[in-house]
Image (tube, rainbow, N blue to C red):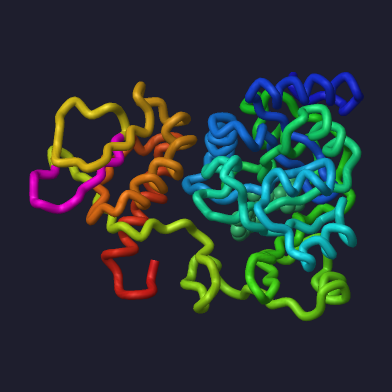
Amino acid sequence: MNLVTATSEAIARGAEIIRSGGLVAFPTETVYGLGADAFNALAVARIFEVKDRPQFDPLIVHVAEKKMVDALCTAVSDRAQTLIDRFWPGPLTLVLPKRDVVPDIVTAGLPTVAVRMPAHPVALMLIEQSRTPIAAPSANPFGYLSPTSAEHVAEYLGDKVDLILDGGPCPIGVESTVLDVTQPEATVLRPGGLPVEEIERAIGEVRMVTGDVDEPQSPGQLPHHYAPRTPIHILTANEWPVETGKKIGLLAFRRPDRTGPFTLVEVLSEKGDLREAAARFFSCLHRLDKAGLDLIVAEPVPEVGLGRAIMNRLSKAAGRHARPEGRR
Ligand code: TXA
Ligand code: MG
């Protein structure tokens, strides 16, 4: 059984697992998280595999010290610093501009990263001893409620995780409040454990995002999903591009066995491994998008496991250019 009481020995073992690229479920003051080394893209890809989520969502990176935020973010504004000093450790997640060292799969391709310092001794010890920030979503499979006890996690995920640290029930029991502080107006993206009133007492009025976060955002706001600017076309069976004078890039699943009129080819996984493909997906897409191409053609990947999440994101990116202005 991989469910163990969070003694100091068990936490040390958990830290060893995180350092070697494994997954550890751990308690926080809000809900249980499913953690991996935030700097290890392959380990983070496994989080999505275990959660069986048909899409990629940006993850929260958990730190054990306030100053660890500087290793992850390019700029911490005075307003963000005020919130950190006031509410960390605690149930407040801040969305800040990310550094390049944060893998794209952690942020689902976004230029921002969500960071929080949890107020739970087990979580803090685990992060400290792992000597790396820990990327973790709530430890539930897709479509289930966030777990507030180690038994929930064991029921949900069982042997799919390497270790579940039992630190008892989560004292708060709802997820952290997510606040975007990258824009002039601070915006609550998800209400949670820290009341909005308390945030407003510290920094003044904040905006609330209402309705479907998948809907187009108001002008000046960053999109919630990374969307490439270059048009994307997903290849159908037997379809292969021919020379047209256009600059075409290929997003290949495996190393292609035929050539084509490509300015740039990005291979997701030489050996056709979906976990590696997921880990590299956003960075490959970023490179293609920055190459000044007229078109990106993408090979479909098998729609099993992580392949579903990759295809979901590809279809969204492809559909964006096929639909009327402003819709994604
Ligand atoms: O209390 C919590 O926040 C728990 C514990 C484990 O820390 N974690 C949690 O993670 O609830 P998750 O992945 O279930 O929810 C993270 C939320 C999602 O709504 C996600 O869209 C948002 O944070 N988020 C993460 N990174 C973001 C980013 N760069 N921009 C906008 N939203 C982001
Ligand atoms: Mg969740």
Q: Which residue is drawn at 54% across and 35% down?
A: 45
Count of number-bearing discs: 0
Could you tell me residue 265's position as x and y percent? 27, 37
Quadrant holding the C terminus:
bottom left
Toward the viewer: 101 or 62?
A: 101
Asked if residue 147 shows in the view, the reply is no
Q: Is residue 163 visible?
A: yes
Which residue sits at x=78%, y=68%?
Answer: 79
Q: Quarter-wise, where is residue 257 in the image?
A: top left
Q: Does the magenta stretch include residue 246?
A: yes
Closest to the observer, 73 or 273: 73
Q: Does residue 306 appear to the left or right of 122 in the view shown?
A: left
User: Residue 65: x percent and y percent?
Assistant: 84, 43
Q: Residue at x 29, y 69 (%)?
A: 323
Q: In this view, does 204 lie to the left or right of 187?
A: right
Please state the horizontal and vertical placement of residue 215, each as a whole percent of the image. 48, 71
Tell me the quarter of the picture where residue 253 sits: top left
Judge whether 49 appears above or below 295 on screen: above
Front-most of residues 213 and 287: 287
Quick check: is 25 in the magenta stretch?
no
Q: In this view, does 244 lie to the left or right of 264?
A: left
Residue 59 in the image, given as x and y percentages of width and height: 63, 47
Q: Is residue 234 left or right of residue 169?
A: left
Above or below residue 130? Residue 120 is: below
Asked where in the image residue 261 lies, by quadrant, the reply is: top left
Quarter that holds the N terminus: top right
Magenta residues span 241-252
What residue appears at the point 62 percent right and 27 percent down from the top-left corner? Answer: 160
